[in-house]
Structures are given as C-alpha cells and as structure tokens.
Amino acid sequence: MIKSATVWGFLLALALAVGVFFGRDRSTPLEALKSSSDRSARVRLEDFVFYRYKGQAVNANFSAKLGLFYEPNIVEMHGNLHGEQYRRGKLETLRSEIGHAIFSSNSLNALMRDGTLVRAYVEDNVIMELDGNLLKTEQAEYIASRQILRSHRAIRVIGPSRVFDGDDGFTYDVDREVLTMSGLIQGVVSGQPRY
C-alpha cells in the first residue's frame, strides 16, 4: 500500500513537473512587447510629433499616427512612423509602420522627463537612410547599449551606383558606421571608375 502511494506520488510529481516545463513562458522580448497590447494604455496619442533639442536647435524628431504608452517604460507606435536625426552632421531617417520601444524609466513620468532608450523594434516596410545608403527590410532591432541596429530578415541596400540584396539579415554598428550583411549577398555595381 505504501509502495503504491509512493509510486502514485512520484508519477503525480513527474506529471506536474512536465506540465510546468512545457507551460513556461519562452517569449522573446519582441513577443513580450506585442503582448503589451493586452493591457490598457495609460496614455494614447494620435498624430503626434516628438522633438529633441540640442541647445536651441531641433536635433531629431519622430512622428506616428498612434502612440500607446504602457506603464512603466513601453511605447508602442502604429501607422506611418517617421523619424529623423542629425548625427555627425548627416541626416539619418527611419520609416516604418509598427514600432515598439523599451526605455530605462520606472514610470511614465520619468519616461517623459528623461527616458533613455534601451531597445527598439520596428517592422513592416522598414526603410532607413544611413550614411547615404538606403536600407530596406521587414524588421529591425536597435540595441542602445551596444549601439547596434540588426535584423535577421532579408535586406536591400541601395547606394550611389550600387544595389545589394542579402538574404540573411544585417548588423549595422552605429558608432563605427559599418554595415555587415550575412548569408548570400547579390549585388550590382555600376558607374564610372574614379581615378
């Protein structure tokens, strides 16, 4: 009798452990951001534009059709995202349809006062203009601590007298302004040689 109770207890504990293992949350940060829409937004902005100033001059701006701010540090943006900033005297632009951003703040008040970007995701027809090159992809992620923009989706790079297509994503080091494409790369280079 005690042996059968021990066996049943063991089988019950094993079944619970297997259930916990398969039921655990294995979501990526992007999936966690997407599930943030299950909660209600604390702030909702429609047709908005944010400006960042450096001294008395506008250094960057960002606009979208809809912005949803979730407590404490998540912003979700939809519809015609457009951002511009001047970096090292050059204009950089970003266009997309959907964006998510995570900030290092612990409340919406702190986010509005001095929110520092930790990570951002953009998807759906992403077009970036960086250093005279146009990058087109379907999804990209920016990691602020490493100053890296990356994607695992196909990319098209259009530059002066050249077009390159990569099928396995890219990594762009923002500080060094270096683009690294992965996988099979096909391209066309044209124009007159410079001597």
Image (cartoon, helix red, strand yellow):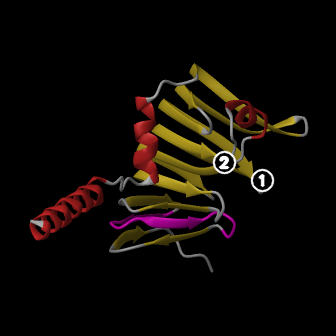
User: For the point 39% across and 62% down, which residue is it?
Assistant: 152
In the image, 74 versus 39, the foreground residue is 39
Secondary structure category for the residue under label 2: strand
Q: Is residue 168 left or right of residue 141?
A: left
Q: Is residue 181 above or below residue 111?
A: below
* Mark 2–mark 1 distance (CA, rounded to whole Å): 22 Å
What segment is highlighted magenta in the picture? 161-176
Mark 2 vs mark 1, foreground winner is 2
Q: Is residue 22 above or below residue 83?
A: below
Give the quadrant of the N terminus.
Answer: bottom left
In the image, 36 versus 186, the foreground residue is 36
Confirm whether residue 125 shows in the render: no
Q: Please provide percent x and percent y for residue 158.
A: 47, 58
Give the quadrant of the C terminus.
Answer: bottom right
Answer whether residue 171 is magenta in the image. Answer: yes
In the image, 26 versus 21, the foreground residue is 21
Q: Residue pushed farthest front?
A: 1
Q: Is residue 42 left or right of residue 145?
A: left
User: Which residue, given by chain and number where applicable, does mark 1 sit on?
Assistant: 89
User: For the point 68% across and 35% down, which residue is it?
Assistant: 107
Q: Is residue 91 above or below residue 88?
A: above
Q: Residue pushed farthest right?
A: 55
Which label was assigned to residue 117? 2
Sequence-first tag of 2 and 1: 1
* Amino acid type of the residue tagged 2 in the rendering: Leu
Q: Residue pushed farthest bottom?
A: 195
